[in-house]
Every structure is written in C-alpha cells, then in structure tokens.
C-alpha cells in the first residue's frame, strides 16, 4: 500500500510566474516588447509593466526609478505629439544587460522629429525630453519607414549612439 503524505507536509507546487497586465511574464528573458493601445491610459499601464519587470530583476533602485520616469515621458510624448502605428498601437521595448537598461518607444511619427523643447522658465509643458536627456546615459531618435523610435540607455552606455 502506498504511503500518503499528510496535507501539512504536502510537496509545494512550483510557483507560477507573475504576469503583467499585457500578459507578459515578469522578470523573464533579456528583453520584452509590448504593444499598447493608443490612449492616455496606456501611460500608466506601460509604466507599471516596465517597473514590475525591472524590479523583479534586482536592478539598482535608481535605474528602476529612472526607467519609470523615462517610460512615462516617452509614452506620454508619443501619444501627445505623434500618431499611432498602423495597427493603432505604440510599441514599447526594453532590454536588460547587467545593470543597464535600454528602453524604446515606437510610434507612427509626428509632424517633427522628437527633440527637447527650448528652455522656457515659466512654461508648464515641454520638459519631457529635457528630463529624459538629464537621466539618460545616452538617448536618440531613429526614424524609419512607418515609425519613429525614441530610445534611452540607463545605467550605462548602449551599443547605439545618439543622433
């Protein structure tokens, strides 16, 4: 007769990996890509997904905090100043290598190339890319047919070079 294991001594099940609200597994793989709906509420949803994923990777808190701010700024700027990709979304990709994080936000492009606005002391808008530039080790813009990608390297250099 087979021995039974009392429930108090049951073998624990393997913990199921956590998923973000886009369905991605948190903290797994070297990179993640999500497509977010083209609407203002995507800013907070994308930010939460990026922060949850990066925090699960034991990155320095400062890098996760910077990624949170940069993600909010880039997604907000895309929705405010550009148009969606052909499928009505924007694409957000982040890649982790050691303690460095590269974040990309791709949209359908706008009327102008993304660049920091001129400094105006009393202005209540136009500081997004200035904030990004101050936090980034590197940043740049890549324009290609069908989209514009703004990318940022945090925590150290990337393989890219800013334009």
Image (spheres, rainbow, N blue to C red):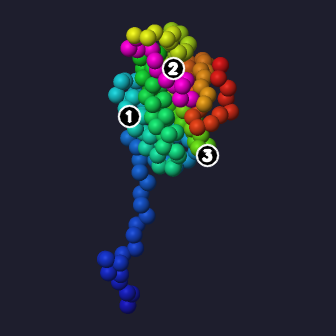
Task: Give the class, few, some or many, for how many residues have Cα within 10 Å of label 1's Cα (few <14, many ≥20).
Answer: some
Foreground tag (2 vs 3): 2
Foreground tag (2 vs 1): 2
Q: Position of residue 59 (x, y in %)?
A: 53, 46
Q: Does residue 86 appear anywhere in the picture?
A: no
| Label whose residue precedes the other's in the sequence (2 or 1) | 1
Quickly name the residue at label 3. Answer: 98
| Label whose residue precedes the other's in the sequence (2 or 3) | 3
Circle 2: element type: helix
Quickly name the residue at label 2. Answer: 130
Residue range corresponding to the magenta coloring: 123-136
Circle 3: element type: loop
Residue at the left extreme of this rendering: 7
Task: Give the class, few, some or many, for how many residues have Cα within 10 Å of label 2's Cα (few <14, many ≥20).
Answer: some
Foreground tag (1 vs 3): 3
From this view, report whether residue 46 is shown above or below residue 8: above
Report whether 155 appears left or right of 24. right
Circle 1: element type: helix
Q: Position of residue 32 (x, y in %)?
A: 52, 40
Towards the viewer: 98 or 39: 98
Residue 80: quarter of image: top left
Find out whether the residues at labels 1 and 3 contact each other: C-beta distance under 8 Å. no
Which residue shows up at 35% across the image and 83% down it?
A: 4
Q: Is residue 68 magenta?
A: no
Residue 81: quarter of image: top left
Q: Position of residue 6 (x, y in %)?
A: 32, 81
Which residue shows up at 53% across the image and 15% down it?
A: 116
Quickly name the residue at label 1. Answer: 45
Quarter of the picture holding the N terminus: bottom left
| Label whose residue precedes the other's in the sequence (1 or 3) | 1
């Amino acid at each position: 007769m087979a021995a039974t294991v009392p429930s108090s001594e049951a073998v624990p099940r393997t913990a199921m990996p956590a998923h973000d609200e886009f369905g991605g597994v948190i903290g797994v793989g070297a990179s993640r890509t999500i497509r977010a709906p083209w609407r203002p509420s995507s800013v907070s949803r994308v930010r939460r997904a990026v922060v949850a994923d990066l925090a699960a990777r034991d990155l320095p808190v400062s890098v996760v905090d910077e990624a949170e701010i940069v993600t909010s700024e880039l997604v907000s700027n895309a929705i405010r100043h550009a148009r969606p990709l052909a499928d009505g979304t924007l694409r957000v990709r982040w890649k982790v290598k050691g303690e460095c994080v590269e974040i990309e936000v791709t949209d359908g492009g706008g009327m102008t190339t993304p660049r920091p606005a001129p400094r105006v002391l009393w202005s209540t808008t136009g500081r997004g890319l200035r904030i990004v530039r101050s936090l980034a080790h590197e940043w740049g813009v890549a324009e290609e047919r069908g989209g514009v990608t703004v990318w940022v390297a945090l925590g150290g250099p990337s393989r890219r070079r800013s334009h």
